[in-house]
């Protein structure tokens, strides 16, 4: 008889195997470098093994993720639009919820970008190491530098060109995310005008497409432990240990940004917009935050956040039942923050500077693409590859952060879910008549 393994338990095991893959890969790479220090023949041999054997193994995993980028973004966003079109008819509740979701995500990305621009972890690598990296991931260093000139200068005409190339399919084939996002949203918006039966069929079709792509991502993730071991070993052999210091700094920046947004921005929003006590809020939501952290899945945390919101925070069932499921799908502040940080980190490593205009475009794009991310572990990886390609940064550069992705996934999911519950609190307070607001909910979760 086969034992039944729960999805979160299987995800934990995979995460553990991925961490082991990273540790083994790093160990093997370091051992090879030490050995190369004693014999020059060994050094050439290690580089040959890295380039001819380890890199292709890693590429199988990365290309599988690349395969799904375009259909996944299209299906998730068009589906989200069709569903939103119906929800928008719900009026003020929906409008306030979406406005807060947008604000949460935009502030999250801005925080992440400010941190990355200040600390600049990707620039800790020596120019030699950067050139080797560019070569390792199949790009010529000159091509990465040429990306500098390819960064669009933002004028009205370039904006129209960026969002609406004459041939949308060619733009999409070239991995341009902007026309893809616009096209998907137009299809979704048009979908809301279809007759009910047809709209439902369209929803089902898009759901099937998104589910198929998620399956392919799952296949890729099964290869991840071996692929990440291979990529890490090859990275250390070719680039050296510099890359580890840069990576560590990147992790610190992302965790710092997530903590600042969760405990800083959310506390501020709760104080200013709802007059709830942030301290009581965090005390009441401990179980929710721990569940999000340990499952790395907004969807898996939904039952706990619904229960806590109603029973401990005193949020009305109708608000919690509306805001939280929507938030688990659309409100991804932690994911948006992380996406922006990865794009900037990889750009810094490859020496592709992103000017202010490009970073504003990045902010907008990360918000849209985070909306398209499913509330499951590791769901943002294919979308980040799409974002990298959009800015002429090699998408394979994502390999740099894969080994630490699971840890950061736990942290970003905690923020995703924390922001959902904070939004539910605020919206609930706004929707209650003042006299009932004072009476509602356990006093512990409200400010005195
Ligand atoms: N794991 C995240 C969530 O469930 C999504 C992601 O960023 O990959 O919210």
Image (cartoon, rainbow, N blue to C red):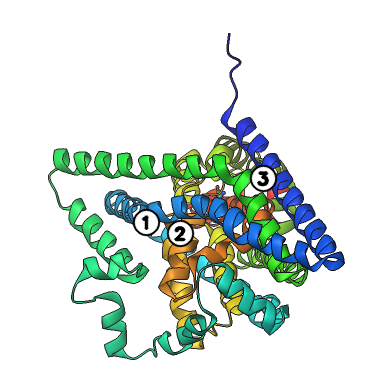
The percent position of residue 288, horizontal first and vertical second, equals 66, 42
Residue where numbered disc 2 is placed: 383
In the image, residue 164 sits, relative to residue 381, either above or below, namely below
Can the viewer see residue 443?
Answer: no
In what element is the residue under mark 3?
helix
In the image, residue 311 sits, relative to residue 269, either above or below, namely above
In the image, residue 339 sits, relative to residue 327, either above or below, namely below
Q: Nearer the viewer, mark 1 or mark 3?
A: 3
Residue where numbered disc 3 is placed: 18
Give the class, few, some or many, for how many residues have Cα within 10 Å of label 1's Cα (few <14, many ≥20). Answer: many
Mark 1 vs 2, N-terminal side = 1
The percent position of residue 445, horizontal first and vertical second, equals 69, 48
Mark 1 vs 3, N-terminal side = 3
How far apart in space, not on screen, are marks 1 and 3 (Cα)? 25 Å
Mark 1 vs 2: CB contact within 8 A: yes
Instruction: Tell me which residue sits at (70%, 57%) in the image.
Output: 233
For this view, does 72 lie left or right of residue 405?
A: left
Residue where numbered disc 1 is placed: 73
The percent position of residue 26, horizontal first and vertical second, equals 75, 56
- In-front residue for pair 5/398: 398
């Amino acid at each position: 008889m086969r034992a039944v393994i729960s999805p979160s338990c299987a995800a934990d095991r995979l995460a553990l195997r991925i961490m082991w893959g990273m540790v083994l890969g790093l160990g093997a790479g370091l051992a090879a470098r030490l050995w190369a220090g004693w014999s020059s023949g060994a050094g050439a041999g290690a580089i040959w093994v890295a380039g001819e054997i380890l890199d292709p193994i890693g590429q199988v995993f990365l290309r599988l993720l690349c395969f799904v980028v375009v259909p996944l973004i299209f299906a998730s966003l068009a589906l989200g639009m069709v569903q939103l079109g119906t929800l928008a008819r719900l009026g003020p509740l929906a409008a306030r919820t979406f406005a807060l979701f947008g604000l949460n995500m935009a502030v999250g990305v801005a925080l992440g970008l400010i941190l990355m621009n200040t600390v600049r972890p990707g620039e800790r690598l020596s120019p030699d190491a950067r050139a080797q990296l560019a070569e390792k991931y199949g790009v010529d260093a000159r091509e990465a530098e040429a990306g500098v000139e390819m960064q669009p200068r933002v004028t009205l005409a370039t904006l129209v060109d960026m969002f609406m190339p004459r041939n949308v399919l060619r733009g999409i084939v070239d991995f341009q995310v902007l026309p893809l996002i616009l096209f998907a949203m137009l299809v979704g918006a048009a979908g809301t005008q279809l007759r009910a039966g047809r709209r439902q069929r369209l929803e089902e079709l898009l759901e099937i497409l998104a589910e198929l792509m998620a399956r392919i991502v799952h296949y890729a993730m099964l290869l991840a432990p071996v692929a990440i071991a291979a990529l890490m070993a090859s990275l250390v052999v070719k680039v050296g240990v510099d890359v580890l210091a840069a990576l560590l700094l990147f992790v610190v920046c992302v965790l710092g940004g997530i903590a600042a947004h969760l405990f800083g921005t959310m506390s501020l929003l709760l104080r200013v917009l709802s007059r709830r006590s942030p301290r009581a809020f965090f005390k009441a939501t401990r179980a929710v935050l721990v569940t999000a952290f340990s499952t790395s899945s907004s969807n898996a945390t939904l039952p706990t956040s619904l229960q806590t919101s109603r029973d401990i925070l005193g949020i009305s069932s109708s608000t919690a039942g509306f805001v939280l499921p929507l938030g688990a799908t659309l409100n991804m502040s932690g994911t948006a923050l992380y996406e922006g940080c990865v794009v900037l980190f990889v750009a810094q490593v490859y020496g592709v500077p992103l000017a202010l205009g490009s970073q504003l475009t990045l902010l907008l794009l990360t918000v849209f693409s985070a909306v398209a991310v499913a509330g499951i572990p590791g769901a943002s990886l294919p979308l980040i590859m799409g974002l990298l390609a959009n800015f002429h940064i090699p998408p394979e550069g994502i390999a740099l952060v894969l080994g630490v992705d699971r840890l950061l996934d736990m942290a970003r999911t905690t923020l995703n879910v924390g922001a959902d519950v904070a939004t539910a609190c605020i919206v609930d307070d706004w929707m209650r008549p003042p006299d009932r607001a004072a009476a509602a909910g356990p006093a512990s979760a409200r400010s005195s």
